[in-house]
Image: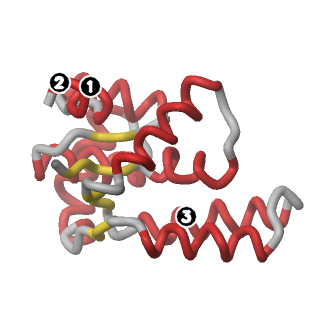
Amino acid sequence: MSFVLDNSLAMCWLLVDGKPADVAYAETVLEALSDQQALVPSLWALEACNVIAKAEAKGLLTEARSQAFIALLERLNIATDTATAARALSDTLHLARRYKLSAYDAAYLELALRTGLPLATLDADLKKAAQAAGVQAFAQASLTG
């Protein structure tokens, strides 16, 4: 089984911050990648780069720690969707408007809707929108599937 992986969750692997339940969920998703594939929109790598660069600038990460994390990401079973940009000014914009999401978050929702895959996210607004749109949460899908 595959799932859509939101950047908020992947960055929890790096920064290990947030509520204990969120960190535990992030670890569960990371473990799932040993036998499942995550699908991400094409903006995912840029979002990860932005978080890494900002965390380094704030002194939260060293460049060496960032490079080790990037090496981990490159080993994981994460595939990039190539249709994200083609849908940005249509489906994604519609979802951003409808659910009052950023275009970035709407790209994850669009991908989950288009592929019928569950969504793994820690973002509260994206979770709420996904639920309203009928997208299954990854943990729920993996426990019942």
Q: Quadrant of residue 44?
A: bottom left
Looking at the image, which residue is at 58% across and 73% down?
70
N-term-proximal mark, 3 vs 1: 3
Numbered circle sitting on residue 140: 1
Disc 3 to disc 1, C-alpha distance:
25 Å
The three-letter amino acid code for the residue at tag 1 is: Gln
Of discs 1 and 2, which sits in the foreground?
2
Secondary-structure class at tag 2: helix
Above or below 93: residue 49: below
Q: Residue at x 37, y 29 (%)?
A: 127
Disc nearest the viewer among 3 and 2: 2
Give residue 64's quadrant in the image: bottom right
Mark 1 and mark 2 in contact? Answer it, CB < 8 Å. yes
Q: Secondary structure at mark 1?
A: helix
Query: Which of 122 and 69 lies nearest the eye of the viewer?
Result: 69
Decide if residue 6 is on the left or right side of residue 10: left
The one of 10 and 72 positioned closer to us in this rendering: 72
Write down the residue under mark 2.
Answer: 144
Tag 3–tag 2 contact (CB < 8 Å): no
Badge number at residue 48: 3
